[in-house]
Amino acid sequence: MIRIMSGTARMPYNHRVSFRTLAMSHPHTASPDNPSRRHWLAAGAACGGALLAPAIARARELLPAPKNRRVVIVGGGWGGLSTARHLREQAPGLDVVVIERTSAFWSHPQSNKWLVGLDGGTTLTHDRQTAAEAFGYALLHAEVIAIDRDNRQVVTAQGTVAYDWLVLATGVRYDYTPWFGNDRRAADFARRNYPPAFIGAEEALALKRKLEAFTGGDLLMTVPPMPYRCPPAPFERACMIGWWLKTRKIRGRLIVLDPNPPALGFDRIFRQHYADQIVYVPQATVKTLDPFSKRISTDFDTFDFTDAILMPPQQASDLAWQAALIGRDASGAPSGWAAQDPLRLQSLSDERIWLVGDLIDRASFLFGHYPKSGHLANRLGRIAAGQIAARAHDKPLTPGLPDSVCYVHAKVEPLEMIRIDTAFRLRGDGVIMQTVKQHYDPNPRGEDAAWAAGMYAEFLAAPR
Ligand SMILES: Cc1cc2nc3c(=O)[nH]c(=O)nc-3n(C[C@H](O)[C@H](O)[C@H](O)COP(=O)(O)OP(=O)(O)OC[C@H]3O[C@@H](n4cnc5c(N)ncnc54)[C@H](O)[C@@H]3O)c2cc1C
């Protein structure tokens, strides 16, 4: 079923534009684990697109030919919606289409508070249609199952959408292979029963239900190896769960297995405030994990757990792999992330594709990856929009640098917060440098909620 809406909307920067929303209902949008979708993605990844060719040839074009050049943005999250909003502002002559598989926007920022009932969660979900109408772009509700770079079109189960330029902002995927190899059953079982809650609303809801049902014992949480989205998020989540266990007087503990070097600030907070609730084990790489018998081993220890939040390693999303946009590490192996020109955000494999948000590869040999945050994805969206606008107007592409702000709740009663500011600048030889400043705030006054409200207003057109 396809639904097209059209009309005009008042833009915040004072001119009227037409908008179009095209909603498609089909089985693939319901679950990212749909087997049919996996087949397409696997076929594309396995053969570099060759198997897809006959199917694509038969597919129909979903949208009428645009009057102007068209930018297709795949992914309606922080990065994709920010790109769309700024593109409409900076290049109003371009036809902009956002394609997104989920029906509503879900915000991970601020969700750790909601997980333990400190926030009602009313600001976490947003209707994307409001933004599409306010900023004047088309919104297509569909799952993209392949990118056909040769013919410059994206492929959905219902048909294709042609593009002049493509923005890929599809976020991350989990990589269970270091734990389970090719054992799909174990990976599916782990994701279903021990949701990492790093992708999408469904997992977050499942984790909330899990916490509400937890009555005691050892709750085990694995932190992903770096890089992963929002590095402080697992530790903030641990603080929230520590507080939850303490205030509800639940006879249980949270065991945090972290494969990375010790997170010293959080280690101190855990020991000072949650000594009876949190056991933090840094440099603990998972060696074996049996999700069925609930047993996990590191180099040094074995734990039997009552319940778990199993956060596996992360990589760029499926589409970046299918479209062969993944970079290489120093040894020549796939880096796991979509390789981009760090200052222009164009894919290194295809100059018609821009890469925005958590899926990108490292930005500098000095610090590696940009922090994978919503704030930073928003800034990358703005930079990519500027690059595409310059290209559309035949102007040179000028380098752009983002910034990042992250608010982390350290303690609940009384509330204490850490604000992490990350700035970037160019060294004389063109290499990006990073400066990180942490501010400890023992007396916060809603700065995190104000930041989130500002962001939602900016790219979701949410009322403040
Ligand atoms: C618990 C937690 C707390 C966090 N806290 C903060 C915080 O306080 N501050 C902060 O700045 N960041 C925070 N983050 C990080 C932030 O959520 C991410 O960095 C941000 O979402 C990245 O934006 P993105 O656009 O790259 O990906 P996403 O926002 O995940 O968007 C990707 C979109 O692409 C869609 N998509 C994927 N594949 C397809 C396909 N094939 N077809 C169609 N659509 C597709 C997805 O459905 C999704 O909507 C937190 C993350 C977590 C997990």
Image (cartoon, rainbow, N blue to C red):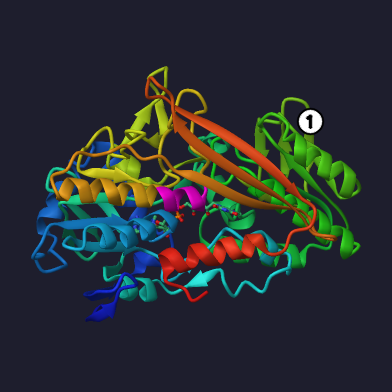
Disc 1 designates what residue?
301
Q: Bin the neighbour count of mark 1 within 10 Å (Cα to Cα): few under 14, some 14-19, many 20 and up.
A: few
Give the x, y percent position of residue 363.
43, 32
Vertical side of 119 occupied by 279: above or below: above
Give the x, y percent position of residue 218.
82, 50
The N terminus, quarter of image: bottom left
The verdict on residue 369 being magenta is no
Q: Nearer the viewer, residue 288 or 413?
A: 413
Task: State yes or no: Cβ of the residue under disc 1 lies below 8 Å from any atom of ligand 1.
Answer: no
Q: Main secondary structure of the magenta part?
A: helix
In the rendered image, which quarter is residue 289 located in?
Answer: top right
Vertical side of 364 occupied by 148: above or below: below
Give the x, y percent position of residue 444.
74, 59
In the displayed structure, does residue 348 sit left or right of residue 213?
left
**Part of the protein shown in magenta:** 373-379
Disc 1 residue type (three-letter): Asp
Give the x, y percent position of residue 103.
41, 71
**Number of marks in the image?**
1
| Residue at image location 64% in from the left, 49% down from the top | 233
